[in-house]
Image (spheres, grey):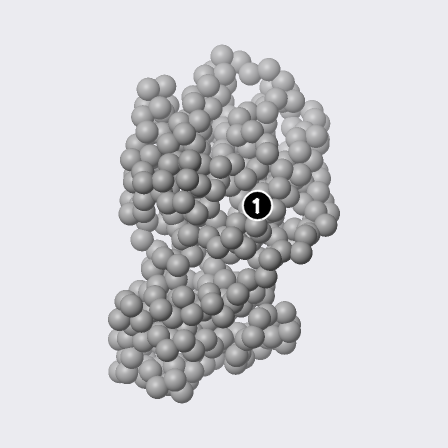
Amino acid sequence: MIPNFAPIDFAARRARVAQSVKAAGFDAYVGTRQAALHYFSGSFMPWRGAVIITANGDCKFVYWAWDASRVREEGHGLDLESFTFSDFVKTIGQRLQALGLAQGRIGIDLSHPGAAQVAPGMLTASEYLELRDELPGARIENGVHLIDDVMLIKEPQEIERLRFAAGVADVGFEAGRAAVKPGVTENAVAGAIEKAIRDHGSTWAWAITGGTEVGSGVRTGYLHGVTQQATEKTIQQNEFVILDLHPMIDLYLADSSIPVFIGKPDAQQRKLIDCWEEVVSTMIDHMRPGEPIPEVVKKGLAVFERHGLSGYCLPTFGHGLGTCARTRPFINLRSEDVVQTGMVMALGTHLYMPQVGGMRLEFPLLVNERGGEALMKTPPRVHFV
């Protein structure tokens, strides 16, 4: 059962971002990403929508009409205008004009420097062009930092929800590991995981990668391959199994993947396991406040290099967690972030060798004063069946 979480002060949250907008010299931020919609509304908003935060503290929402009544009911103090068909950008423009910002400096969700993927809900090229036409006198710029700088360090209420979501991931992993047997299909294992996390309060399986992922045998070893949607392939002896699950609790996500091996690894598989586990411990050990993230990444890459497996690893080691899993900090060499107390991330370690197998770590980690604190109880190592 989900506990009674400490309530989130959405008014204070909106005010902090308004201060960020003003301090950066903008007149408004227009957020279209899932991260922003959930962060400001407190309601699940899977369809096209936008939140407008002005430097003066106004907060307005634009959302698809055919889901708007639910969002109004479930959200927290929403001033929401709905739109139908293709009037999304037109409605945003009208709201900005009504706020007196037709000539303003507007920050939008346009580009995410350092990200390995496009975050769900980024403004499309056609929408950007349409917004320029709607507001020809406005100065429209990338504004992701206006909210990302605020979301980077988590509130206590967010940590409470993220910790619970990680505990649900523990339950899901255990259900998946128990279901891994020779002759069982990947789909059956995914179903066991999904039932377990739903039974413990998860309300959505992050859909970008196909929801709950299960891959086994040769399907774990696609070169640089990070997606294994579950199939009807049967699991066999002496192979890796990837379990990748994404429970959501009160709009906050866990992103969890810890490898399983069924049977006994051969020498080549053992070499991969030893390397992967050393990289994992290295990354966790060095996730300390004050460390520039690129320097931590270099330490992990050095372990892959020493084992002669650099060609099979990914040079990226995770991403932030919150109301989306496409948020800072991005754990790669392009990151401009320094490890800070209060960050929450899905720490990643990826190693995939074709025809041999592969392992993936996605491990919810909170940075505290001493370093990285695991939010899951399941140890981040290979688990044998």
Residue under the image location 70 percent in, 30 percent down:
178
> Does residue 362 appear in the picture of this structure?
no
Q: Nearer the viewer, residue 156 or 257?
A: 156
Q: Position of residue 8 (x, y in %)?
A: 55, 62
Q: Position of residue 293 (x, y in %)?
A: 32, 40
Residue under the image location 38 percent in, 75 percent down:
54
Residue under the image location 62 percent in, 41 percent down:
167
Q: Position of residue 158 (x, y in %)?
A: 52, 54
Q: Quadrant of residue 261?
A: top right
Q: Which quarter of the rendering shows the C terminus? A: top right
Q: Is residue 235 left or right of residue 322?
A: right
Q: Position of residue 170 (x, y in %)?
A: 62, 38
Three-letter amino acid code at disc 1?
Answer: Arg
Q: Is residue 159 left or right of residue 307?
A: right
- In the rendered image, the vertical position of residue 144 relative to residue 194, given as above or below: below
- In the rendered image, the vertical position of residue 233 relative to residue 191, given as above or below: above
Q: Which residue is mark 1?
A: 163
Residue under the image location 56 percent in, 29 percent down:
379
